[in-house]
C-alpha cells in the first residue's frame, strides 16, 4: 500500500467533486467516527466466537467499513500534514518501550 499515492488519489477524487471546502480535519474526523460506528455495528450482537467466524458477505461488509475508516484516516493525515508512515513507526517504537515483552515464564492474560 502506497500511502502518498492513495492520498493523492483521494485529493483528486475530492477535487473532481468540488468537495475541498468540506474536507477539513474536523469534518473528516467526524465522518470517520460515523464509519467506525458502522464498523462496530457489524459485531454488535455477535459473541466473541461469532466475531471470529464471519461469513463471506459479512467479511465483504467488514472490508468496506474498514476501508471507509482507513480512507478518512488517510485524508485527515494528509490535510493535517502528518506523515503516517513516520508516525506509525514512532508509535510502534514507543509501544515497544512502554510494553516490553514478558519473560516466557510469566503467565499471560
Image (spheres, grey):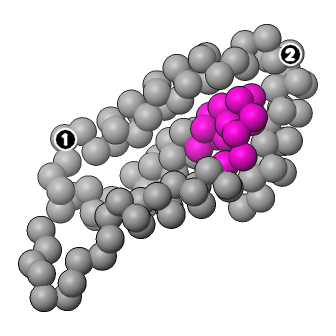
> Does 28 sit above or below residue 21?
below
Residue at horizontal 28 percent and vertical 45 percent from the top: 43
Q: Is tag 1's residue or tag 2's residue first in the polypeptide sequence?
A: 2
* Residue 1 visible from this viewpoint: yes
Residues marked 1 and 2 touching at CB (< 8 Å): no
Front position in the image: 66 or 28: 28
Q: Which mark is residue 89?
A: none
> Main SS of the magenta segment?
helix
Q: Which label lies toward us, 1 or 2?
A: 2
Element under disc 2: loop
Residue 18 - label: 2
Q: How many neighbours does mark 2 have within 10 angstroms: few (below 14), some (14-19), or many (20 or more)?
A: few
CA neighbours of label 1 inside 10 A, class few (<14), some (14 to 19), many (20+): few
Q: Residue furthest bottom?
A: 105
Residue 10 place in picture, x, y as percent: 79, 37
Residue 55 horizontal/vertical position (percent): 36, 60
Picture residue at 13% right of the left edge, 88% below the top:
105
Query: Does the segment drawn in magenta span residue 20?
Result: no
Q: Position of residue 109 (x, y in %)?
A: 12, 68
Q: Quadrant of the N terminus?
A: bottom right
Residue, disc 1: 45
Q: Nearer the viewer, residue 24 or 82?
A: 82
Magenta segment boundaries in residue numbering: 70-84
Residue pictured at 60% horizontal, 17% vertical: 26
Picture coordinates of residue 34 (x, y %)? Answer: 46, 25
Amino acid at each position: 500500500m502506497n500511502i502518498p499515492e492513495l492520498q493523492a488519489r483521494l485529493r483528486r477524487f475530492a477535487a473532481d467533486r468540488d468537495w475541498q471546502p468540506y474536507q477539513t480535519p474536523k469534518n473528516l474526523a467526524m465522518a470517520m467516527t460515523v464509519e467506525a460506528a458502522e464498523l462496530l455495528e457489524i459485531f454488535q450482537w455477535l459473541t466473541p466466537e461469532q466475531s471470529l467466524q464471519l461469513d463471506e458477505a459479512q467479511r465483504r461488509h467488514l472490508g468496506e467499513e474498514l476501508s471507509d475508516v482507513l480512507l478518512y484516516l488517510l485524508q485527515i493525515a494528509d490535510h493535517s500534514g502528518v506523515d503516517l508512515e513516520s508516525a506509525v513507526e514512532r508509535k510502534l517504537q514507543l509501544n515497544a518501550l512502554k510494553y516490553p515483552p514478558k519473560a516466557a515464564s510469566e503467565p499471560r492474560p
